[in-house]
Amino acid sequence: MVLGVDFGTLSGRAVVVRVSDGAELGSADHVYEHGVITDHLPDRTDPLEPDTALQHPGDYREVLRRAVPAALREAGVSPQQVIGIGTDFTSCTVLPVTTDGTPLCELPDLAGRPHAWPKLWRHHAAQPEADEINALAAERGESWLPRYGGKISSEWQFAKALQVLRDDPEVYGRTERWIEGADWIVWQLCGHETRNVATAGYKGIHQDGAWPTPDFLAALDPRFADFAKDKLDHPLSQLGERAGGLTAQAAAWTGVPEGTPVAVGNIDAHVTAAAARTTGPGRMLAIMGTSTCHVMNSEVLAEVPGMCGMALGGITPGMWGYEAGQSGVGDIFGWFVDTHVPPAYHEEAAERGLSVHDLLSAKAAEAAVGEHGLVALDWHSGNRSVLVDHSLSGVLVGMTLATRPEEVYRALVEATAFGTRTIVEAFTGAGIPVHDFTVGGGMVRNPFVLQIYADVLNRPLRVVGTEHSCAVGAAIHAAVAAGAHPDIHAASEAMGRVREDTVDPDPRRAATYDDLFAVYTELHDHFGRGGSDSLRRLRALRGAAFAADTADDPTPAHATEGKR
């Protein structure tokens, strides 16, 4: 048996998997007590600046303490039967820590400093720093910039670190290691620091064996010159390798014996390729949850405009792994249900024993394509691909006084599908063909969403055969690290699962979606490529209003310094 532990945005989950055939024997979830910290720090009232998204490192440890033992109990297996543990993490979720791995927010004198806390992947307050990095890299012709589709995201390591330096230099100075959650949790399990090739390549601007030069970093800020050397640099491990053995402390947390092999850390979407049997070239996998990450292997090195990045061995050793993504998908649907659906719909859903999502899906599925007269832009959390701009925001056009909630819900689902189609066409246009398309993650539970994606993409969807695709992918890597399978490809073939039936497009609906996609593309380019800067101006006004509200606040200077 092997354990896979998936650290998501709102919760963590553990699954016990049989090595021989990938059967899931038991699973358990643990919801983070602190969730996503966006308004104020725990036990504080000082407001956080807009687009802040932090987390509590104690929530991650609680997953090990609670979900792992619970999964073992449900599986009915002895902890001594576990031969390996693998983990995956949202990314780029990054922590400032000391040399022994202690998060700075757990130091008493820094607990009230926002920049001492882990920055979740969807922390977008570093967009000004990302803009600065991109402008300087383009001006200097930095060779690594095209490897990231021409733009570094505000979600990635360097933009977030530069924001810490600018907003709270003391916290930056106290940061001895700047580390991805994927590597930090392995540090907690093994007792020593490791770094994986995927997070370094996709989120850390590590290309061709090197970081951005000290000269480039100094041009951003002289104090930033040694950031990579001092706070990032470390030998990189390949995915599926053994990071070390479980420490006595971690054994006490999980109940698994000390010394049990632990796999090198990995990104949630990337680890899932093994569970989805998409480790071969040209097989795009979309992990659809709160956000969507699109990953694909290729034997070809190419530059895809607007992709999140590429890394040799970033998904499986020996091939170029490509990544793109959408910052908001399930988050957008959840936002609409939580804030814009009238009470009568909630009451009807309760009477029918449905979730509000299922009720809206059922009502929306009855209409013909285009009947609502709406098109939306899926930028409620900014645009990760292909525009790489988190100053953008959501748009909905075509509303009338007759527009119903289920119609808006459908338009939002369609918008995310159009965003995925934009990504697929970008890869194909750059000479990286997408041979087939597989989906995994929480959205596989909604047939309505899957059918819209099949129709918009006009191609059959393969569906991962588990709702715990990330955790199972982590378990597959654990099997490789423990020596139960020779490599990730073999382990994927033995333990991965895909449903036999595909979700096939309807030709008539697909043809109508071509017309709607043309409108989406027109709006996409108008608001995102320079036809109008209205969305960015609105974001600037929002930031100015926040700054005005906090200008006279008696909050300590370090908490409001650099607010934008």
Image (tube, helix red, strand yellow):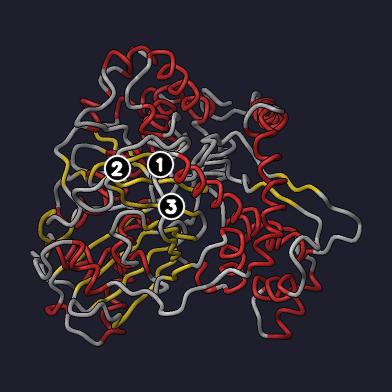
Q: Badge 3 local density, few (<14 within 10 Å), some, or many (20+)?
A: many
Q: Residue at x 81, y 56 (%)?
A: 373
Q: Is residue 32 visible?
A: no
Q: Which residue is mark 1?
A: 431
Q: Quadrant of the C terminus?
A: top right
In percent of width and height, residue 528 lies at 63, 34
Q: Which residue is mark 3?
A: 294
Query: 335 and 215: which one is in front?
Result: 215
Q: Quadrant of the N terminus?
A: bottom left
Residue 536 lies, with reference to residue 25, above or below; the image says above
Q: From the viewer's perspective, is 103 left or right of 523?
A: left
In percent of width and height, residue 145 lies at 38, 27
Q: Badge 2 local density, few (<14 within 10 Å), some, or many (20+)?
A: few
In percent of width and height, residue 488 lies at 19, 61
Q: Determine whether label 1 and label 3 are within 8 Å by CB.
A: no
Query: 206 and 457: which one is in front?
Result: 457
Q: Determine whether label 1 and label 2 are within 8 Å by CB.
A: yes
Chain-order first, disc 1 or disc 3: 3
Type of residue at label 3?
A: His
Q: From the viewer's perspective, is 521 left or right of 437?
A: right
The part of the image, by quadrant, that contains residue 111 is top left
Type of residue at label 1?
A: Gly
Q: Is residue 286 visible?
A: yes
Chain-order first, disc 1 or disc 2: 2
In terms of secondary structure, where does tag 2 sit? loop
State how far apart marks 1 and 2 are (Cα). 9 Å
State how far apart marks 3 and 2 are (Cα). 17 Å
Report the number of numbered marks. 3
Q: Residue at x 74, y 64 (%)?
A: 369
Type of residue at label 2?
A: Val
Q: From the viewer's perspective, is 64 left or right of 250?
A: right
